[in-house]
Every structure is written in C-alpha cells, then in structure tokens.
C-alpha cells in the first residue's frame, strides 16, 4: 500500500505483530530525521500496534513525510490502520 508520504508492505504471520520503520535521509538533517522517526514510532505505538492482530509490517517514509505535522502523520497511519484491518480479514 502507498499513501502520499508512506510506503507499506505487510506479511501475515503467527505470533505478536512486528512493525519495522525506515526513515531515509532524503537530504534532511539528522535532527529532522530523528524527529520524524520519533513521531512515527509514537503514532505507531498508540494507533497501529493495538489494532494489528498478527503479522509483519514495514513502513518506509517518503521525502514528503518530513513536511507533515504530527496530526498529518496520524492521519496517514490511520489510513494504514484501516487498510491493515481489511487485509487481515
């Protein structure tokens, strides 16, 4: 699945859900990259992990993700959450 700022890959597996996060530099500073990584990790922890039953997801941030606010990132993760719940059915 792709959103305007994130690429997502999912594989259904048994056991606890695992989510990997990739945040490339995209010509941004280390501070910007770490800020984006912290924001995504927090949103994933609060929004996505409780709703994923089992499986592995890989989320890769595009360069446009650096421009989004926390609320915008939360909206993107919300659309991923919706997609993952339909995939697992």
Image: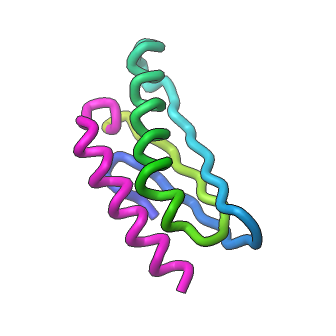
Q: Nearer the viewer, residue 53 or 73?
A: 53
Name above or below for residue 86 compared with residue 26.
below
- Percent x, y for residue 13? 73, 71
Name above or below for residue 87 compared with residue 4.
below
Q: Nearer the viewer, residue 13 or 59?
A: 13
Q: Does the magenta stretch include residue 67?
A: yes
In the image: residue 75, left or right of residue 47: left
- Percent x, y for residue 80? 41, 62
The chosen color scheme is rainbow
Name above or below for residue 35 compared with residue 88.
above
The rendered magenta stretch, by its main secondary structure, is classed as helix
Q: Does the magenta stretch include residue 35?
A: no
- Percent x, y for residue 87? 52, 79
Q: Which residue occupies 55% across, 67% down?
A: 52
- Percent x, y for residue 58? 59, 52
Q: Quadrant of residue 62?
A: top left
Q: What stretch is highlighted in magenta?
A: 65-89
């Amino acid at each position: 699945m792709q959103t305007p700022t994130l690429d997502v890959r999912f594989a259904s597996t048994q056991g606890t859900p695992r989510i990997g996060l990739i945040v490339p530099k995209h010509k941004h500073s280390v501070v910007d990259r770490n800020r984006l990584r912290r924001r995504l990790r927090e949103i994933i922890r609060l929004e996505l992990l409780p709703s994923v039953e089992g499986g592995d997801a890989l989320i890769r941030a595009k360069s446009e993700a650096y421009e989004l606010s926390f609320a915008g990132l939360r909206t993107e993760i919300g659309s991923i959450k919706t997609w993952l719940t339909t995939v697992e059915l």
